Image (cartoon, rainbow, N blue to C red):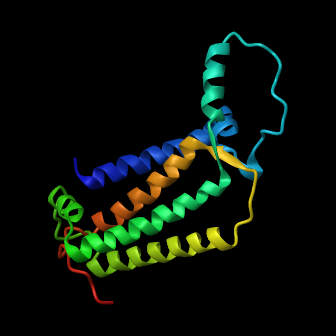
Amino acid sequence: MEPAVLCVIFFSLGTAVDLGGIFFPAFRQHIMNYGSRSTSSQPEPTTKSPRKTTTSISDYMASIKVPHTWFLHYYITSVASSLFWAVQILTHGLVFKLFALYSPHPTTGTMTVNQVFLVWLLMAIQGMRRLYESLTLTKPSQSKMWVGLWALGIAYYIFMGISIWIEGIGKRIGRMPCI
């Protein structure tokens, strides 16, 4: 399967999760809300429902949470991904060669190498800025978020790094631009 198709599938699934938070209030309440949007301080209803097992399983899954401080992992992943792809492109690394092999090589309709490099550079700067802020400016919090959302955030930064380079891989493969 083409790497670009994998990126489209991932970002489509991420959109579906976001829409789930909009269209399903129970999903939003148990999974999507964290931090200042959390409703965990509200008392749980005491009525018994016939779907006790389903509720228990979903409640258990929703209860697996990580500290808000783990947001730091997003930015570590972002910076690491930017550095990884810089090394891969500069050295014609194995992963880059595999992605180039499994990607179509269009001659028109994609971004230029300079445009791809600029997007990569801006993503690297944003990741470094957010990492710096997380290390120096973020205040400790008791807030927690669902572990699944945390994992999706990590995957987001991995797939973002891939999708940046996939966009221009069909153009002069492996040539870093001079802006």
Q: Residue at x 50, y 42 (%)?
A: 16
**Residue 101 locus on image (x, y percent):** 14, 59
Q: Is residue 92 left or right of residue 14?
A: left
Q: Residue furthest top?
A: 50
Q: Residue at x 64, y 41 (%)?
A: 65
Tell me the quarter of the image containing the C terminus. bottom left
Q: Residue at x 85, y 31 (%)?
A: 43
To which quarter of the image does residue 39 belong?
top right
| Pick the front one: 155 or 141 | 141
Q: Is residue 118 above or below residue 140?
A: below
Q: Residue furthest bottom?
A: 179
**Residue 172 locus on image (x, y percent):** 17, 76
Q: Is residue 125 left or right of residue 114?
A: right
Q: Residue at x 73, y 13 (%)?
A: 49
**Residue 110 locus on image (x, y percent):** 27, 69
Q: Is residue 106 left or right of residue 167?
A: left
**Residue 140 locus on image (x, y percent):** 74, 60
Q: Is residue 119 above or below residue 36?
A: below
